[in-house]
Amino acid sequence: MACTPEDMRLRDIAIGLQAEIAESNFRLEKATLRISELQIHIQELCNHQRTTETDLKAAQQLSEKLRKDLRVRDAEIVAIRESRTWLIGSLVLAPIRWMKRSKR
């Protein structure tokens, strides 16, 4: 059979459409792959965020424990300095401190 110009034009259009479909499928596969890569990256970031939040909570708990320990020790120091023994010791050692200061 002889191909008419109309048949050739339609065949050319069909070939062009097939090429566009193939290109679209390729882009779709590429986009799907990129989406899966981004989902994996998002999951990794979520995991990192969870571990960071856990570490932050642990650091806050440690900080609070240290603050509590400092408050207890400060209270002990205040109690010692308010004791009679401390006052008597300060009075007994006061002349020695004054002599040391005057020699400077």
Image (cartoon, grey):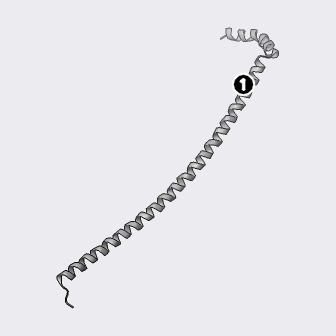
* Quadrant in the rendering for residue 9: bottom left
The residue at 60%/45% (across/down) is 53
Q: Where is residue 84 shown, x and y percent of the image?
A: 82, 14
**Residue name at image x 64 percent, y 38 percent:** 60
Give percent across and percent down for residue 57.
Answer: 63, 42
- Quadrant showing the N terminus: bottom left
Q: Secondary structure at mark 1?
A: helix
- 61 or 16: nearer the viewer: 16
Q: Is residue 35 left or right of residue 60?
A: left
Quadrant housing residue 24: bottom left
In the shown orientation, is residue 7 left or right of residue 71? left
| Disc 1: CA contacts within 10 A as few (<14), some (14-19) or many (>=20) | few
Q: Nearer the viewer, residue 9 or 27?
A: 9
Residue 49 coordinates in the image, percent (x, y): 56, 48
Quick one: 26 or 84, which is closer to the camera?
A: 26
Residue at the spot 75% in from the left edge and 22% down from the top edge: 77
Image coordinates for residue 8, horizontal then vertical, percent: 21, 81
User: Please, is residue 36 above or below residue 12 in the view?
Assistant: above
Where 102 sits versus 82, above or below? Answer: above
Amino acid at pointer 1: Asp
Of all residues shown, which one is farthest toward the left?
A: 5
As drawn, the residue found furthest toward the bottom would be 1
Task: Report which residue position mark 1 lands on.
Answer: 74
Quadrant position of residue 19: bottom left
Residue at 74% over, 24% down: 75
